[in-house]
Amino acid sequence: MNKIRPLIMVWAGLVFAVGVAACEPSDRTPGLWLSGEFTEFPDDWTFTQEHKEIFVEVTTPYFVSHSVTIWCAALDGTLYIGARNPDEKNWPGWVDTDPNVRLKIGEQLYDVALEPLDDEEILTALRAVYADKYDLPQTSGGTPTNTRYWRVVERS
């Protein structure tokens, strides 16, 4: 019995470590809560152009955090995020219910809010910034892809 107890402790520690590591999203696999160091809301988000992927954590109706990997783009120092095919995903609807989200950029965490973006002039400029950053084809004839965008703002 004395030999089994240390094995159980090692096994439990390993399961815990794997569970904690599996909390954040990876590529297309969603995660739970995000970890990192909290940072103040920046005046200029241009630094995010160096990050191809960031994470967003939203609140679900089940009171369990849900996080996904997303793309972002900065336009005139303001950060925007998008969801391609938003009707096929749950998290955009959860943002409609609670716009307070957490972003992870590098190892930094930001508690922010999301505002839906519907200004066509900004959307046109933002699509061009996304196309540039991610080497995407420009949409022809002004026909946008099925993507929904949000402006990242400070929580009130």
Image (cartoon, rainbow, N blue to C red):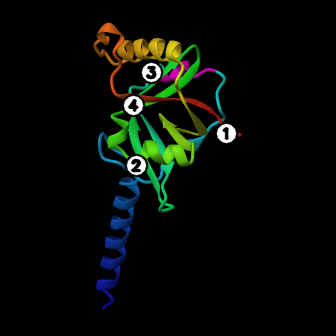
Mark closer to the observer (4, 1)? 1
Whole-percent x, y for residue 102 in the image:
54, 43
**What secondary structure is marked by label 1?**
loop
The reply to whether the magenta stretch includes residue 46 is yes
Q: Which residue is mark 1?
A: 155
Q: Which class describes the residues within 10 Å of circle 2: few (<14), some (14-19), or many (20+)?
A: many
Residue beneath disc 4: 53
- Decide which of tag 1 and tag 2 comes sooner along the chain: 2
Precedes in sequence: disc 3 or disc 1: 3
* Dominant secondary-structure state across the stretch colored magenta: helix
**Cα distance, mark 3 to mark 1?**
24 Å
Residue at 53% across, 26% down? 117
Tag 3–tag 1 contact (CB < 8 Å): no
Q: Which residue is labeled 2 in the image?
A: 24
Q: Residue at x 32, y 42 (%)?
A: 88
| Total marks in image | 4
Residue 42 horizontal/vertical position (percent): 64, 27
Q: Which residue is mark 3?
A: 50
Q: Earlier in the sequence, mark 2 or mark 3?
A: 2
Residues under labels 4 and 1: Cα distance?
A: 22 Å
User: In this picture, is 118 found above or below 7?
Assistant: above
**Is 122 above or below relative to 51?**
above
Q: Looking at the picture, does residue 140 appear above or below residue 146?
A: above
